[in-house]
Amino acid sequence: MNKREHIINGVLIGIGVGVLLSPTGDKWMVHSVFSVAIPVTLGALVPDIDTEFGKHRKTLHNVFVLAVFAAFPFVYGNLQYVWIGVLTHFVLDYLGSKRGIALFYPLSTDEWNFPFGVKVTNRFASIVTILVTVFELTIGYFVLIGSTVAGVTLPL
């Protein structure tokens, strides 16, 4: 997907996660939405920095980069939501894009994709982005609810 779709995805995921974390309908929910949406949106843009250096959809589109961003909050105690943006970027490129991503680069240059993706220039790219975003938020909802029921505190 292109930058526009990743921004749409990041903003909607950030809003959705912010509401899920604080579904109060008051100023605390608004605070939660902004606290989550900004870093998630920035994280959703990070992998495409590899268009300026390296190999696009390889250098910064792999599980090793995701692991670094997921570990960052545990090591430094901040940027806890950026990894969500990076993850949703990968999911959007995997599910929504015909090309896919090299999940295990540099160990493998094979690009993985879902068979129903579209080209980034396709007129349905924005619709696919919304569908993938709804899917991601649905999964996020059930992970959050499931963890609450199980009494597990997620590191969000």
Image (cartoon, rainbow, N blue to C red):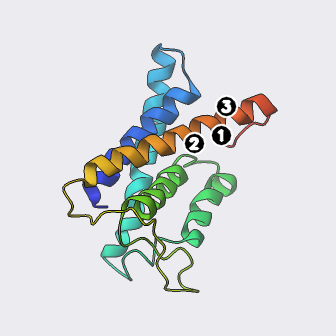
Amino acid identity at mark 3: Ile
Q: Is residue 21 above or below residue 104?
A: above
Residue 139 — which label?
A: 2
Which is more toward the observer, 77 or 32?
Answer: 32
- Distance from label 3 to label 2 (Cα)? 10 Å
What secondary structure is found at the residue carrying circle 3? helix
Q: Residues within 10 Å of mark 3 (few under 14, many from 20)?
A: some
Residue 98 in the image: state x and y as whole percent. Answer: 35, 69
Q: Which residue in the structure is indicated by mark 1?
A: 143
Residue 135 — which label?
A: none
In the rendered structure, which disc, 3 or 2, sits on the residue that comes first in sequence?
2
Residue beneath the point at 44% across and 78% down: 58
Residue beneath the point at 54% across and 54% down: 83
Residue 124 vs residue 66: left or right? Answer: left
Give yes or no for contact between labels 2 and 1 (Cβ–Cβ under 8 Å): yes
Q: Which residue in the structure is indicated by mark 3?
A: 145
Residue 119 in the image: state x and y as whole percent. Answer: 27, 66
What secondary structure is found at the residue carrying circle 1? helix
What secondary structure is found at the residue carrying circle 2? helix
Amino acid identity at mark 2: Ile
Residue beneath the point at 58% across and 47% down: 80
Give yes or no for contact between labels 1 and 3 (Cβ–Cβ under 8 Å): yes
Residue 104 appears in which quarter of the rendering? bottom right
